[in-house]
């Protein structure tokens, strides 16, 4: 997403280019994906869809059908709450994904996770990804919890184990 946004900012146009071979849309995956996106993003759903469409229409369709229709929205042992918490864990270890991290922290809260559960996921991600990633993810979590009016009950621990 960030790469396509950078391409879009410098003005590279998809007009006049050979179109990608597209497979036929999957109506079932689209329906599930749309419902999952609406559940996760709530009132920000339309803005997200418009942003993805601006970056590239196929990115928007991929997001709806595959990422949310076939992955996050599928049935199985993990609830949508757990899938969102897993997404937060993966994002917590990546640099330069604060917008996506912010969206998925809100998304986790929208589908029933508590701010304490999100904090615990971010703290565990520190063990895998290290202090720099942890600091960035903690900053995002604190900003979201403040904006959402939810207090993080325990401050994330610093590298020395102190709060």
Image (cartoon, rainbow, N blue to C red):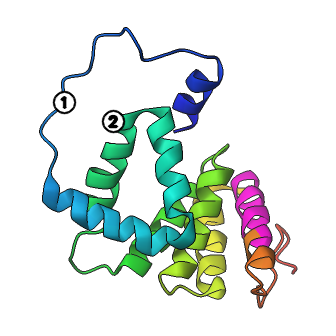
Q: Which residue is mark 1?
A: 22
Residue 38 sits in which quadrant? bottom left
Q: Is residue 85 above or below residue 46?
A: below
Q: Is residue 9 left or right of residue 82?
A: right
Q: Is residue 140 left or right of residue 56?
A: right
- What secondary structure is found at the residue carrying circle 1? loop
Tell me residue 36's x, y (percent).
35, 69
Pick the quarter of the image with the C terminus. bottom right
Q: Is residue 88 left or right of residue 19?
A: right
Tell me residue 151's x, y (percent).
79, 87
The structure residue drawn at horizontal position 23% and vertical position 69%, both measured from the top left corner, is 74
- What secondary structure is found at the residue carrying circle 2? helix
Q: Is residue 87 above or below residue 57?
A: below
Is residue 156 visible to us here?
no
What range of the chain is rendered magenta?
A: 132-143
Residue 145 sits in which quadrant? bottom right
Q: What is the crowding at mark 1: few (fewer than 14 residues within 10 Å), some, or many (at least 20)?
A: few
Disc on the earlier residue, 2 or 1: 1
Q: Is residue 137 magenta?
A: yes
Tell me residue 101's x, y (percent).
61, 59
Distance, label 2 to label 1, CA atoms, is 8 Å
Q: Is residue 121 magenta?
A: no
Q: Are marks 2 and 1 in contact (CB under 8 Å)?
A: yes
The structure residue drawn at horizontal position 26% and vertical position 53%, both measured from the top left corner, is 65
Q: Which residue is mark 2?
A: 58
Tell me residue 136's x, y (percent).
75, 56
Is residue 103 visible to us here?
yes
The structure residue drawn at horizontal position 18% and vertical position 23%, both measured from the top left corner, is 21
């Amino acid at each position: 997403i960030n790469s396509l946004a950078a391409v879009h900012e410098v003005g590279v146009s998809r007009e006049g280019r050979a179109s990608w071979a597209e497979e036929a849309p999957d109506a079932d995956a689209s329906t599930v994906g749309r419902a999952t996106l609406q559940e996760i993003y709530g009132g920000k759903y339309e803005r997200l869809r418009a942003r993805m469409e601006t970056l590239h229409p196929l990115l928007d369709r991929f997001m709806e059908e595959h990422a949310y229709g076939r992955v996050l929205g599928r049935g199985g042992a993990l609830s949508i709450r757990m899938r969102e918490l897993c997404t937060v864990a993966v994002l917590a270890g990546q640099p330069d994904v604060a917008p996506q991290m912010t969206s998925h922290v809100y998304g986790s809260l929208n589908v029933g996770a508590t701010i304490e559960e999100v904090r615990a996921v971010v703290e565990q991600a520190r063990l895998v990804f290290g202090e720099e990633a942890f600091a960035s993810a903690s900053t995002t979590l604190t900003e979201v919890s403040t904006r959402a009016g939810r207090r993080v009950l325990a401050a994330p621990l610093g590298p020395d184990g102190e709060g």
